[in-house]
Amino acid sequence: MTNPPENTEPTYLDVGSGDESRRIAVIFLPAGKTELPALVWLGGYRSDMSGTKAVELERHAAALGAACIRFDYSGHGVSGGAFRDGNISRWLEESLAVVDHTVAEPMILVASSMGGWIALRLIEELRKRGEGDRVAGLVLIAPAPDFTSELIEPNLTETERVSLIERGYFEEPTPYGPEPNIYTAILIDDGRENRVLKGIIETGCPVHILQGMQDPDVPYTHALRLVEHLPADDVVLTLIRDGDHRLSRPEDIARMLAAIDGMLAG
């Protein structure tokens, strides 16, 4: 893990009301040059804003003079709320609340894994509000849109199906830490209501996808399928032959930052 920049203590934003209220931790780096789009980090499933890519994004924003926003979804990192209560709708609501609260200028969404799904839904909701022009670009890193219905449900074992019915969740070992991944029935059911790979996706902005071909979690064919749903956008797909799911090596970080710089220059 990369050490975060100095003076980046989070502030907290309350989202939801009553029993649904949760405190979302946000780190906001103000812009040094107001004409640049803000860089907004959307993390992956069970990831937090202290990860390598998120911190390096903020360092790059500081060097450019751009604003940067990173935050933890509820049940992640230092935000409040229980992880098992989380789903795409809930984390989308939090993402919208964060950008509405912090971002006045146009923004480039930089999203990893599940964050790519959140980003596409975020744009969809902004466009419904007539605010699609708030998003100036989209950088997706190993994007996992619709992963619950496309990648998890078709591969459930009988044991996992029974566990979902009887316990409301199942566990799956992960190479990224000692604790198993937990997938809840709440997450899977809600995922069906948030699918984006069901027709043409209109983002109204340039899109750059970075995808490892050795990704064991999200196969690169999933990125190819996503591109098919983006016929109206300026889309660049970079396939990294030896890249894994995290894409956190120095050379991968360099690709992420170059993709951002390309959008800023464009």
Image (cartoon, rainbow, N blue to C red):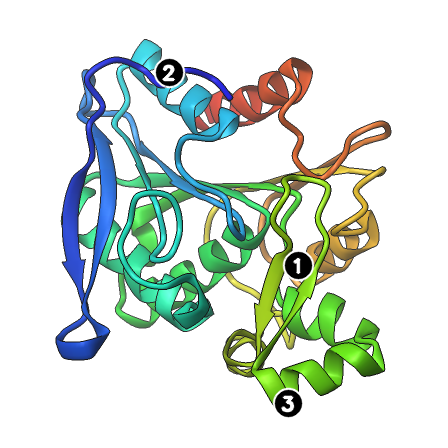
Report the mark closest to the observer, 1 or 2: 2
Name the disc covering residue 59, or none: 2
**Badge 3 is on which residue?**
165
Q: Position of residue 15 (x, y in %)?
A: 19, 63
Q: Residue at horizontal 59%, vertical 77%? A: 188
Callout 3: 10 Å neighbours few (<14), some, many (20+)? Answer: few
Q: Is residue 39 above or below residue 135?
A: above
Q: Residue at horizontal 36%, vertical 69%? A: 90
Is disc 2 in contact with disc 3, using a CB cutoff of under 8 Å?
Answer: no
Q: Is residue 48 left or right of residue 130?
A: right
Name the disc covering residue 112, or none: none
**Which quarter of the picture shows residue 39?**
top left
Q: Position of residue 56 (x, y in %)?
A: 45, 20
**Badge 1 is on which residue?**
231
**Which quarter of the picture shows residue 237?**
top right
Which label's residue is closer to the chain start, 2 or 3? 2
Which label's residue is closer to the chain start, 1 or 3? 3
Q: Identity of the amino acid at label 3?
A: Ile
Q: Is residue 250 above or below residue 93?
A: above
Callout 2: 10 Å neighbours few (<14), some, many (20+)? Answer: some
